[in-house]
């Protein structure tokens, strides 16, 4: 049986990249809903419709668990998905707790999509761990589009990030939470803009650790040859051009891991 990794697009490859390292004997199905990407400006009802359709498709492909490797979809639809589908479903949320644990009384910027920034799930999360109002939220919807177009380090990207982030007195911050899986591709560009006192935090490792724990708990870990199937919405990716594109994203993620 396969582990499903779901995202609106190719951002969730950052979670897959973590999972294939920590779970080398599992089979994976990566589902990118590229027909409907980006989710960050869609309504909750639209996102729930898209994710429900994707989950039914993955269920037909015999997945044993699904990681919703999309903060936006987690925020908008995770509760309804767990009610409808009787398999382990692991969601993503901005690593606010991790930032609070590591940096204690320091300021943090969370960058995410508009749906995540406005959503109740993130507001509730911040209320639990930020009783001193040390967390600022920034919606960066264009980064998803840049990522889907393999535009990571252009002048347009740098200008966009500078315009949004240099509004803050960055000397007063200790961390920047990557609250969308698409944003992991931009760590080198962000590092160029941000001062060295700001460290990156994301939820990928914690999400994969939770996946492993849930599989162990229900005795669903396997010892097989690792295989990965890729789907763009309901269409299997067989084109070598597109497979090469996915491999370029994965290689970039390996480089981004080295950037703090």
Image (cartoon, rainbow, N blue to C red):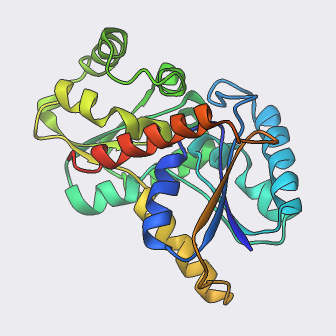
Taking depth in this image into account, of 97 and 197 the one nearest to the observer is 197
Q: Is residue 191 above or below residue 220?
A: above
Q: Is residue 231 visible?
A: yes
Taking depth in this image into account, of 43 and 66 the one nearest to the observer is 66
Find residue 34 and report its image quarter: top right
Q: Is residue 147 above or below residue 77?
A: above
- The N terminus is located in which quarter? bottom right
Q: Residue 32 placed where, x, y %?
A: 67, 41
Q: Relative to residue 71, is residue 139 drawn left or right?
A: left
Residue, x 48% and y 43% (percent of image)? Answer: 247
Q: Residue 161 placed where, x, y %?
A: 33, 19
Residue, x 57% and y 71% (percent of image)? Answer: 211
Residue, x 59% and y 75% (percent of image)? Answer: 225
Residue, x 83% and y 61% (percent of image)? Answer: 61
Q: Relative to residue 27, is residue 249 drawn left or right?
A: left
Q: Residue furthest front?
A: 240
Q: How many marks?
A: 0
Q: Is residue 180 visible?
A: no
Q: Residue 26 placed where, x, y %?
A: 59, 73
């Amino acid at each position: 049986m396969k582990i499903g990794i779901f995202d609106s697009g190719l951002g969730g490859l950052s979670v897959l990249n973590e999972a294939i390292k920590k779970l080398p004997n599992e089979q994976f199905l990566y589902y990118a809903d590229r027909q409907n990407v980006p989710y960050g400006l869609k309504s909750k009802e639209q996102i729930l419709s898209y994710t429900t359709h994707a989950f039914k498709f993955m269920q037909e492909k015999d997945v044993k668990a699904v990681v919703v490797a999309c903060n936006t979809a987690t925020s908008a639809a995770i509760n309804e998905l767990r009610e409808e589908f009787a398999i382990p479903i692991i969601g993503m949320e901005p690593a606010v707790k991790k930032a609070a644990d590591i940096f204690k009384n320091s300021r943090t910027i969370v960058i995410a999509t508009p749906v995540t920034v406005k959503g109740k799930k993130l507001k509730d999360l911040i209320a639990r761990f930020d009783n001193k109002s040390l967390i600022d939220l920034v919606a960066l919807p264009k980064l998803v589009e840049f990522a889907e177009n393999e535009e990571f380090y252009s002048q347009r990207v740098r200008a966009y990030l500078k315009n949004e982030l240099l509004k803050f007195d960055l000397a007063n911050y200790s961390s920047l939470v990557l609250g969308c899986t698409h944003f992991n591709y931009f760590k080198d560009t962000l590092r160029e803009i941000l001062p060295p006192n700001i460290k990156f935090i994301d939820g990928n490792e914690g999400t994969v650790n939770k996946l492993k724990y849930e599989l162990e708990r229900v005795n669903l870990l396997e010892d097989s040859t690792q295989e990965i199937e890729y789907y763009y919405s309901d269409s299997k990716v067989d084109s070598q051009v597109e497979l090469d594109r996915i491999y370029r994203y994965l290689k970039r993620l390996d480089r981004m891991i080295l950037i703090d």
